[in-house]
Image: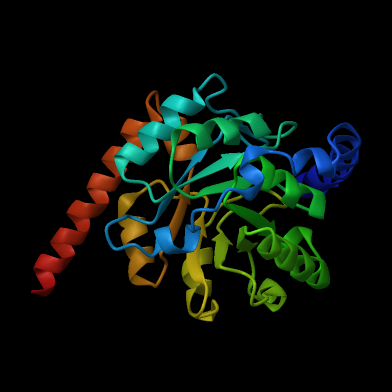
Amino acid sequence: MNILEKIIAHKQKEVAERQSLYPTKLLEQSLYFTTPVVSLKKYLQREDKTGIIAEFKRRSPSKGDINPYASVERVSIGYMQAGASALSVLTDTAFFGGKNEDLTEARKFNFCPILRKDFIIDEYQLIEARSIGADAVLLIAECLEKEQLGQLAKQAKQLGLEVLMEIHSRAQLDKFVPEVDAVGVNNRNLEDFSVDIATSLDLANDLPKDAVRVSESGLNDPQTVVELRRAGFEGFLIGEYFMKQAEPGKACQEFVQQIQRIEELYDGAIT
């Protein structure tokens, strides 16, 4: 059993347990359940933003602890002040050290799109995402059958949530449905957690034209982000690189500034 299979097996048990503890009717009473969402798609397409989806991530199965005692308030505010377009918050506890309360805390301090980063396999998790203040959810093609992904995407839209569909291979594009707002290419292989940025560049021309293009994982060089932007990507999910720094918000700010300097050089060379 690979890492992804272990995560999904655990997630199935976790969802069943949470449903018994926190019934749907209880979740629907949340203040956030009827609050209008902030569009991830629109923010990623804003010309005054970098397209960076800055992630709050305490640990990972492959790297272990990254920044286990980080403050959600401090880091999330720092990200937004640095010029990030959106936030991503990991809510998986067993493998990533996150929790639902992390996303709700980020929501309290920031007016921006917040992506719930988790392994979503059940409609209950969509209702849960809405109740904790998420604006968008991640649906991982590798974890879901085509019909299942399509159904979850439709249910997400009915709840007002936007959908980021994550793929790792060309074949997984067959699972794309019109309800998907953005397609993310994960440069990390979820079976062995190896990373190759070339994955995004290889798939760039095959991605649906109507969906925002997002590159995920392994992005630690501003030059790479500039190259990806020129290949048609509008979103860049970055977590580990920022979170392993003493001040993630400052690291994000410096990263954004470097992107801007490189693009100015490119534009200057063209003119």
Q: Is residue 33 left or right of residue 210?
A: right
Q: Which residue is depicted at the point 34% across and 35% down?
A: 251
Quadrant of the rendering where the C terminus is positioned = bottom left
Residue 205, position in %: x, y?
48, 80
Name the one closer to the observer, 261 or 220: 261
228 sits to left or right of 104:
left
Can you say whether 96 is above or below 202 in the image? above
Q: Going 79% across and 68% down the picture, which residue do you hit?
A: 151
Left or right: residue 140 versus residue 230 is: right
- Nearer to me, 228 or 21: 21
- Residue 148 picture quarter: bottom right
Q: What is the x, y in percent for residue 211?
A: 52, 73
Residue 197 visible, this orientation: no
Say above or below: 151 vs 251: below
Residue beneath the point at 56% across and 68% down:
181
Q: How many marks?
A: 0
Classify residue 149 by image quadrant: bottom right
**Where's residue 134, x and y in %?**
60, 46
> Residue 217 location in percent, x, y?
52, 50
Q: Is residue 103 visible?
A: yes
Residue at 64% over, 30% down: 101
Looking at this view, name the residue that lies furthest to the top: 69
Protein image colouring: rainbow
The one nearer the camera, 268 or 2, is: 268
Q: Is residue 68 left or right of residue 215?
A: right
